[in-house]
Amino acid sequence: SLQDLENKSGLGVTNQIIERVLQTGNEINEIEQQNKKGEVIEVQVSIMYNPSSNGHFFYVYFHNNTNKNITDKALILSEKKYNTMLNASPDGIVLINSKGIIIEVSEIGLELFGFNNKEELHGKHYLYLVSPEEKDIIREVISKTIDEGINQNIEVKFKRRNKSIFQGEISTTLIQDPAGEPFFFMISVRDITTRKKIERKMMHANRMASLG
């Protein structure tokens, strides 16, 4: 009965809810309930409607969402933590998810790559920023980061918004979720173009000096 449905779900089932379920076929809600130990748990309640020639049947499914919600909250806190770190770093920072999609970029990162706002990069694959001939190198860097958790001071050529190329040096860090699975990667990018030019000039000067 509807009274049974109300008692089981704790949702305070009203005629409006029943009408919505009749129209859509289902409705999902999250509620807090006490278990037998007196602990408050978060429960997902799914109400489904199954029309029949014998009458209207409603099925109610209960799922304990407590652990999932704790994990979700931990991931949100983790993202906030690393978003705070973005703008504290002197290098450009790019965050990518486990599929290689850019989910965040620091202000210095935007300046480094020549973009005006984050929306221009959000949703793009990180290889979009890499010089074509260097893509295999950075794929290997990411693969090694998955295995070792961190990879530092790797030289990679990057591509700016205007298609110009600059010599970068990157360090990558794997950020795991509470279950130990890859959550996202933090890529720190430093423009070392000027440093490389100075190094080449010094090498040339040393060669000339050795020739007398």
Image (tube, helix red, strand yellow):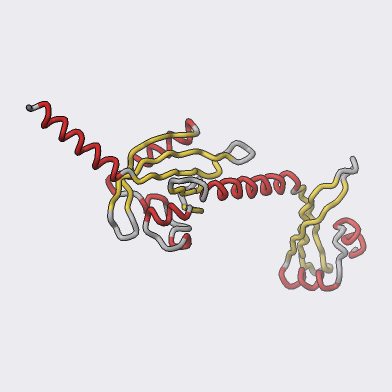
The residue nearer to you, when weighing 19 against 33, is 33
Residue 94, percent from left and from top? 46, 49
Residue 175, percent from left and from top? 55, 40
At x 49% / y 38%, what residue is drawn?
A: 173
Lateral position of residue 52 relative to residue 199, left or right: right
38 in relation to 111, above or below: above
Q: Quadrant of residue 35?
A: top right
Lateral position of residue 209 relative to residue 65, left or right: left
At x 81% / y 56%, what residue is drawn?
A: 31
Q: Quadrant of residue 36?
A: top right
The residue nearer to you, when weighing 44 against 203, is 203
Q: Quadrant of the C terminus?
A: top left
- How many marks overall? 0
The residue nearer to you, when weighing 206 against 78, is 206
At x 82% / y 73%, what residue is drawn?
A: 16
Residue 120, percent from left and from top? 43, 62
At x 37% / y 55%, what residue is drawn?
A: 113
Residue 87, percent from left and from top? 51, 50
Lateral position of residue 74 relative to residue 119, left or right: right
The residue nearer to you, when weighing 50 against 64, is 64
Q: Quadrant of the N terminus?
A: bottom right
